[in-house]
Image (cartoon, helix red, strand yellow):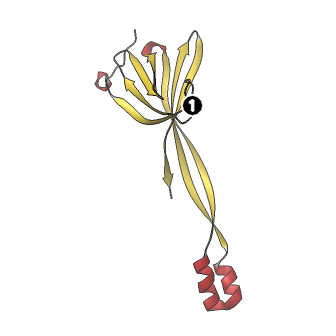
Amino acid sequence: MKKVENNDIYGETIGGLEHLSGLPLAEGTPCSIRYGEDSLTIEGGGSSFTLNYSSITDMDTKTKEDVERQYVSSAGGAVAGALLFGPIGAYMGGRTKEKKRKKISNFFVITYKRNEEIKSILFSVQPIALM
């Protein structure tokens, strides 16, 4: 049986994961992964799943960046523009402005072999929002 090379992680648990696909769990189910001596144990939704290290072909994190666009109207800008420059100033100050927000989605993927077929389990990790 294959074992983890770094035995300092035995008994360690990774939390903060949400199941997306690959297990008989609902999407979004909170999960945790515990490292054992010769296997991983995935727990979530009251169920427990074990994967031997010998069947795991890869464990990796993936990132997907999304740019969200928000349109913001400035009521304060309209009032200030009206006071300074009249109706044209109100129009210019109150225009809808585009504001970009970058959202990074993080995923944890476990790829394993079962009955000579490659399968994967996909988890979402808490996203990071940057301004």
The location of residue 91, given as percent across then percent down, is 69, 81
Q: Nearer the viewer, residue 14 or 6?
A: 14
**Image point (58%, 20%), residue name:** 119
Position of residue 31 relative to residue 100, above or below, is above
**Image point (44%, 26%), residue name:** 43
Q: Nearer the viewer, residue 16 or 131?
A: 16
Secondary-structure class at tag 1: loop
Q: Which residue is mark 1?
A: 26
Left or right: 3, with 129 as reference point: left
Position of residue 121 relative to residue 30, above or below, is above
* Circle 1: residue type: Ala
The location of residue 93, given as percent across then percent down, is 64, 80
Position of residue 35 relative to residue 129, above or below, is above
Position of residue 95 relative to residue 87, above or below, is above
Left or right: 125, with 82 as reference point: left
Instruction: Classify the position of the N terminus by image quarter.
Output: top left
Residue furthest toward the front? 46
The location of residue 54, given as percent across then percent down, is 45, 13
**Image point (39%, 32%), residue name:** 14
Q: Give the crowd class for mark 1: few <14, some 14-19, many >=20 residues within 10 Å.
A: few
**Labels in figure, total:** 1
**Image point (61%, 90%), residue name:** 83
